[in-house]
Amino acid sequence: MRFEALRRDVKTKARLGVCHTAHGSFQTPAFMPVGTQATVKAVTQEELRELGYDIILANTYHLYLRPGHELIKKAGGLHKFMNWDRAILTDSGGYQVFSLGDIRKITEDGVKFKSYIDGSEHFFTPESVIDIEAAIGADIIMAFDECPPYPSTYEYAREATQRTHDWAVRCKEAWSGKQALFGIVQGSTFRDLREWSAEFISSLDLPGNAIGGVSVGEPKPSMREAVEWTAHLLPEHKPRYLMGVGTPLDIIDFVMLGIDMFDCVLPTRLGRNGSMYTTYGRINIKNARFIDDFSPLDPECDCLVCRNYTSAYIRHLYKSEEILAARLATYHNLAFYQRVIRGIREAIAADRLADYRREFLSKYSVGAELKQETVS
Ligand SMILES: [Zn+2]
């Protein structure tokens, strides 16, 4: 993988770039839809291409448990298995092991956990995770890390950060060099741990760097601090990925701090729950005010859904629990995220990202349920 930083916004730390992978190039800032089980829920791979997505994320933990990385390897790798010829990033499973996993034991060597599917016991080590990610065959792979919950004590956060560093070294040693391995900065909500971690992970000189351990239930100011403390310590000439973030406004804000890549379940998960992003804020389609609203979800959206269907019809689909409701909502929300990302890129190219943020917010806050949107 090769990363080209093309341009830097004059007033902020935002940058415009392009990542070249074996499965095509993707522009940055980039948003990666989450395809946990080798599918971005409710949309087809053809639709993702139509929406302009050039990279998606898949979850190592889930694919390891089902259908198993050996089966994916037998299929010729994940790109072939799911018929996606553009870039893929796999996370390392660290986040899932520590958040979903029924953890049996954490040792210096790895983590023993129980499958959420059948209760069977498994053991992940940095080396085994790199092997699993190699079998899956994504273009970008993440190092195995320990993601501490929020809140964590300083002592525990320090131990988890140390273990993350030791494991990153072992991941690098086990890595073939064929895929682009990214290291992950941890450190919870503690400034000295975050800075230490950013410096250590950068020193490994991997193809890219990520900030992890955010979006784990901490308040938004803490998430922002974690990025402010570390983003500038990560090398300029490599992509910076903020894991599990965020809302459209989060993305604009963190691009301004120098982040290039994002992934988040919000547009897809909220869509399935009847919540849609629009230019004038997030709406809940189940709300009675949409009963006879024969206008599109978002008057400024030109996606297939907004061109062809009304809010009243989509509300009816929800109330009738029709599968098409989730399909249309997900498609529109992913179109909205793509429109925001494109707006960000155009604004950086024109040195007007701060103006773009102001314009975005002036409309978005009109009807927005601007409560803090958190992922649970
Ligand atoms: Zn739309």
Image: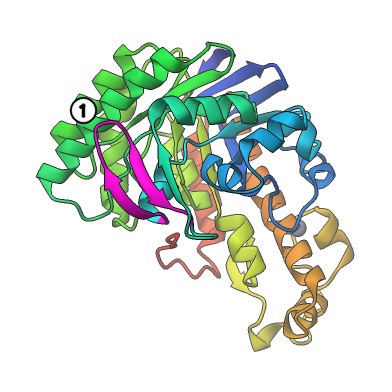
Q: Is residue 109 magenta?
A: yes
Callout 1: SS = helix
- The stretch of residues the image draws in magenta is 100-115
Q: Nearer the viewer, residue 355 or 5?
A: 5
Q: Nearer the viewer, residue 122 or 180?
A: 122
Q: Nearer the viewer, residue 178 or 188?
A: 178
Residue 30 location, x and y as percent?
A: 59, 34
Q: Residue at x 48, y 42 (%)?
A: 252
Residue 67 location, x and y as percent?
A: 66, 46
The residue wearing badge 1 is 195
- Left or right: 225 with respect to 278? left
Q: Quadrant of ligand 1?
A: bottom right
Q: Residue at x 57, y 47 (%)?
A: 65
Direction left: furthest residue: 155
* Quadrant hosting residue 71: top right
Q: How is the image coloured?
A: rainbow
Q: Residue at x 54, y 67 (%)?
A: 366
Q: Nearer the viewer, residue 134 or 202?
A: 134
**Tag 1: residue type?**
Glu
Residue 109 location, x and y as percent?
A: 29, 31
Q: Is residue 1 magenta?
A: no
Whether residue 39 can be seen here: yes
- Left or right: 253 with respect to 275? left
**Label 1: few (<14), some or many (≥20) within 10 Å?**
many
Q: Residue at x 11, y 44 (%)?
A: 154
Residue 335 location, x and y as percent?
A: 72, 50
